[in-house]
Amino acid sequence: MSIVTTTRAAERSGSFWRRAHLTPYWLLAPAVVVTAVIVFLPMLQAVATSFYDLILFRPNASRFVGFGNYIRLFQDPVFWTALWNTVIWIGLTVPLQMGLGLITAILLNREFPWRGLARALIIIPWALPSVVIALMWRWIYDPNTGVLNDLLIYLSVVQGAVPWLADPHLALYAVIATLTWQGFPFFAVMILAGLQGIPKSQYEAASLDGASPWRQFLHITLPGIMPVLATAGLLRVIWVANSMDVIFVMTGGGPGYSTHTLPLYAFIKARQNLDFGYGTAIAVTFTILLGSFVAVYLARTMREVEK
Amino acid sequence: MGFFKTFAAGLAVAATFAASMAIGSAQAETVRFWYHFDNPANPMSELVAKFEKANPGIKIDAENVPWNSYYDNLYTALIGGNAPDAAMVKLFAQPRLVEMGALEPLGARIDAWPGKADLLDNLLELNKGPDGKQYYLPIQYVVLYLYYRTDLLAAAGLKPPTTCEEFRDAAIKLTKAPETYGFGLRGGKGGWDQWGAFVFSQGGALKPGGLTNPQAVAANQWVIDLFRKDKVIPPSAPNDGFQEIIGAFKAGKTAMTIHHIGSSKDLVAALGDKVSAVPVPKCGDGHWTSYGDESLAVFSTSPSKDAAWKWISFLAEGQNNVAFNSATGQMTVTKSGAKDWKLHERRFVDATVDSLPFAHVLPQNAATSEFVNTAWQTAMQRALTGQITSQQMMEELNALVAQ
């Protein structure tokens, strides 16, 4: 009898221990399951699809081609154009947004009347839907009726209307300017939060020691907001890299291929030409490229920040 | 015991409810219908109400799908197994839809339908599928023609051009850059039908080898030269879509452009008598303009094909069709509706009817969709901006057609 009781007690304590041990996993499970089903499963499916020659309106002609789509991709000049455009797209947009955001944050951190209102208004570009922004800027840039050319001609900066979105040498930069305008408030708000976390006493001590405003910025402000810059920068790199809605609405990737980025090229191939095999091959390749970049960035920047 | 009573009562209520739902759904069959109207004042709900009143057993669930992604959504829905029962469709999509096995043949239903005799001549013939079967029921049509500013042409002492030579000459004389340009070319999405008037008329054809012959390449070069050498087209042309060419024409930036009767109301509202239209110019020995079709189709996966047919044939009948076209601003497909047509000014109807003898549709093959959707604009934009030559552009498009 006593043996039985002991065993039961052991079982009870065992299941109790097991339950306590499992609790965190149970709590994590809903998030993990949802992420697995709506993110990882489609990702695996995409990898599998990229090994098939799958044109959606010819479902019966679908066949396994191994790395065929990837070989085709590396021989496709449009892929290399789009890759280069993607590099310019990320390489210009994120630093510009960060720079503009930094200046705005420093201005907003000063005391001036109606500061609360200014802080609220600055967020508007970020709060607007991308499609609205794209349509708005499309008309601002319009050479026939747009306001930008009107202003520039009035100020005698240019002689005739500049076809901002129709010139293959300008179109990408025009779209980058739009996205910079849309994204800088995100940096401004994040950096502002970082600025307010820097103790005033540090500045007071520095000015007592005779440090110039520039040196104060370099040695107090910048290190103080570094963790924010690093995190916000990483988030923006990922978002900007993947965002194609503004490009799609403003130019559709044109003129020609001059505003094709890789996510846009994948979208056009998969959704407009219904070539899912090739489209997913582009998407998978881009995911690997972006993933490696993020890994290197995290390894380097976070180490710096944690120092 | 009390618990069981309540439970049983609840069960009974639930069962009755479920049963009544089942009867309800058996009584009212729902037809899911996709269409695209640019016009925000959309009278579809009135047509739906009229139909549902006449057919109490059928409910219409009509969804206005934005035009720019209409076909992307339609193909994806078809493949994803969530297709509507019926939808508005264009001829260029028919080969692809037939290849997918997505369309329900309508030949027998159309033959048995009293409205068939009221359809304008030849429309059913134009709408035939690539395999000779009838899948499409015509619902509206337009023909592309040349819009011109009467005041600007009169001021320059010009008559509306009838040939390509006259057209180029007029465009050059009308151009006073950067204020005014002779011609508003749509170099962005959907511009292939303007281009067709200049290239398909002069030996170009959407078939293997049909674009790379010397006449077609030269005709294409002629269009490129209008932009690059003659500079009679606004510099924004490579990125201009429908909104831009109409906006520029209304603002007086361009003196001529090519579009169809669907935009006449809007243009008359902005320009009054200063806008008129004639058929597109005759180029070389040929004359070509785009017949802009719109039809209705029932999908083969639909569980309610009969109800869907009732609805689409309702929309193609006499006054219903007139109401439908008053929303789209296009032309009715019925003889009875055309008799007393008041939706457009006479001059635009005349330009449309005068263009019918040489109006064509693109050949029905699987490459046509890609040509219309993405390939033409990407190639044209690069040719217009000097990244590729006319020959290279035509070879690229030929490769697509020859696939």
Image (tube, rainbow, N blue to C red):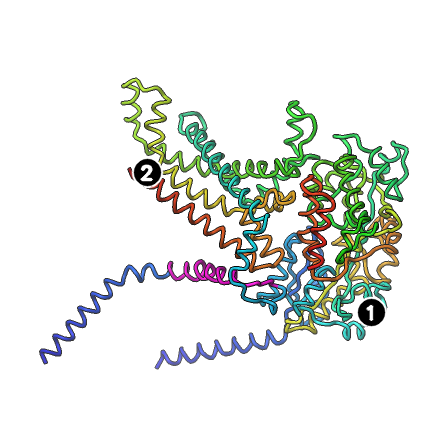
Q: Quadrant of the N terminus of chain B?
A: bottom left
User: Which stretch did the figure color magenta?
Assistant: A31-56
Tell me: residue B243, above or below residue B85.
above
Q: Chain of mark 1?
A: B
Secondary structure found at label 2: helix
Q: Chain of mark 2?
A: A
Q: Splitting the image into 4 quarters, where does residue B48 fall?
A: bottom right
Query: What's the amino acid at mark 1?
Result: Lys
User: In the image, residue B375 lies at what x, y percent?
Assistant: 67, 51
Query: What's the amino acid at mark 2?
Result: Val
Instruction: Decide whether residue A44 is among the magenta residues.
Output: yes
User: In the image, residue B284 lies at what x, y percent?
Assistant: 87, 47
Tell me: residue B120, above or below residue A79.
below
Q: Is residue A117 visible?
A: no
User: In the image, residue A99 lies at what x, y percent?
Assistant: 46, 32
Would you say B86 lies left or right of A3 here? right
Q: Is residue B267 visible?
A: yes
- Decide: few, some or many residues near mark 2? Use Cα within 10 Å; few <14, some 14-19, many ≥20: some
Choose between B185 and B308: the one closer to the eye.
Answer: B185
Main SS, magenta region, reads: helix
Q: Which mark is residue B116?
A: 1
Q: Quadrant of the C terminus of chain B?
A: bottom right
Give the distance between the C-alpha atoms of the residues marked 1 and 2, in whole angstroms. Answer: 76 Å
User: In the image, residue B189 lies at what x, y percent?
Assistant: 69, 48
Choose between B64 and B143: the one closer to the eye.
Answer: B143
On whether disc 1 and disc 2 are found on a single subunit, the reply is: no
Q: Which mark is residue A303?
A: none
Q: Residue furthest left?
A: A2
Choose between A214 and B302: the one closer to the eye.
Answer: A214
Q: Which residue is mark 2?
A: A305
**Foreground label between 1 and 2:** 2
